[in-house]
Image (cartoon, rainbow, N blue to C red):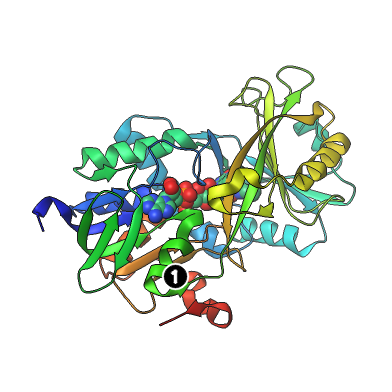
Amino acid sequence: MSSNRVFDCIVIGAGVQGSFTAYHLAKGNKKALLLEQFVLPHSRGSSHGQTRIIRKAYEQDFYTHMMEECYELWSQLEKEAGVELYRKTGLLVMGPEKSENYQQFKTTLQKNKIPTVILTPDNFSKHISNVQLNEGDGAIVDVTAGILYADRALKTVQDQFQMLGGIIRDKEMVTDIKPGPIVTVSTTAHVYQAKSVVITAGPWANRLLIQTGLQLPLQVIKINVCYWKVKVPGSYDLKNHFPCFLLTESEESKEHIYGLPSNEYPEMMKICYHMGSETDPDNRDQQKDRSDIDILQRYIARCLPGLHPEPAVVETCMYTLTPDRHFVLDCHPAYRNIVIGAGFSGHGFKFGPIIGKLLCELSLGKVPSYDLSPFQIKRFQANIKSSL
Ligand SMILES: Cc1cc2nc3c(=O)[nH]c(=O)nc-3n(C[C@H](O)[C@H](O)[C@H](O)COP(=O)(O)OP(=O)(O)OC[C@H]3O[C@@H](n4cnc5c(N)ncnc54)[C@H](O)[C@@H]3O)c2cc1C
Ligand SMILES: O=C(O)[C@@H]1CCCCN1
């Protein structure tokens, strides 16, 4: 095989996780190829759109710990590329004061000494206008949180990868993976070989993994990304320091509702429901369920009086959920040189730089920088399908 088809590592899928993995490989002077089935940039996976939330507020300590370094890596990338990717806004976490989930957020923030502000029903409206705090709800602000400019971040990391000598081939769908000490990867255009392969295929992960005899318990869901028009200009604006928010549960639902200050479209706030209906990633537009939008409408009419309770714009994105909502970051159980990054369960974007670093370490056979036991495949033992 000609040397321009032979690599140290091939990364399959140029979403946020694959792009950061490729970038870390190139930074470590590895010859890396990043393959993408669609023409870049595209909006058919999980990493498109202008914004994502970045936060240290989490229910589990291990995510908060990873975010400490991750903030530094985002900032390094900003400096390296001379591009602004993060804007601090704070994240207002609200939820029934006595509920387990709200208490987990609060405890993790406080235990890890993350800068916070606690709001009480008495001083809430002095700090946050145009939001009705549910009766019995607590409110705590993760001051470190903010917005990541997602599309810009994706382009930046792909550009940096190429500047470091990395190769991206888009419009090349991987059609076959042949495991072995040297892995052979066939696409719709060529055949390549590499010492290791990283699969970061988002909602299509199981489609690729089946070729290696493995199926993970992943569920792909469609998210309606809704933008709501403000009644009074400026009232939920980034410029007026309106924060991101996350509601752990409400009268309307046990699932999170979350929002970002108006930014991408003038005077529209992005508010979404952290759940959706199962979909086939190639036919996601056929999934027309809008019960999530009904839940949002009811909440907005009740608690966000400055918004019209009708979505003005609805876009589409997908989550790939694991049963416990924790990521999969592991080597293939039968082939140690095939590494899997999957199941980011609707909260993986902010971790891109650290996930890229970890997947790169796994692909090089190095000891990973963090304890990856929460992310191992063997936790699914009971519901894993394998023909191995
Ligand atoms: C509405 C919404 C809001 C979110 N909000 C947040 C947030 O606020 N904060 C946060 O941290 N995270 C958030 N997330 C989650 C985050 O965006 C995802 O976890 C992350 O984008 C997943 O990235 P990925 O690289 O795994 O998947 P993807 O972006 O889907 O990338 C996978 C890529 O693999 C390619 N591919 C698949 N199969 C093949 C093949 N056979 N050959 C070649 N290429 C292939 C696909 O085309 C795709 O480009 C949100 C997600 C959604 C949908
Ligand atoms: O990862 C995040 O920060 C958001 C929180 C709410 C649900 C969607 N993802």
Could you classify mark 1 by the number of other residues whose Cα lies within 10 Å: few (under 14), some (14-19), or many (20 or more)? Answer: some
* Residue at the image position 35 percent from the left and 58 percent from the top: 175
Q: Position of residue 241 (x, y in %)?
A: 65, 28
Q: Is residue 367 above or below residue 273?
A: below
* Amino acid type for the residue under numbered disc 1: Leu
Q: Quadrant of the C terminus?
A: bottom left
Check disc 1 and report the residue beneath it: 372
Q: Is residue 283 visible?
A: yes
Where residue 201 sits, quadrant-wise, is: bottom left
Q: Position of residue 282 (x, y in %)?
A: 53, 49
* Residue at the image position 46 percent from the left and 35 percent from the top: 151
Q: Quadrant of the N terminus?
A: bottom left
- Residue 117 falls left or right of residue 53: right
Q: Nearer the viewer, residue 270 or 128?
A: 270
Query: Which residue is the extreme one toward the left?
Result: 2
Q: Nearer the viewer, residue 322 or 135?
A: 322
Where residue 130 sits, quadrant-wise, is: top right
Q: Position of residue 45 (x, y in %)?
A: 50, 46
Q: Is residue 113 visible?
A: no
- Residue 299 falls left or right of residue 16: right
Q: Is residue 1 above or below residue 264?
A: below
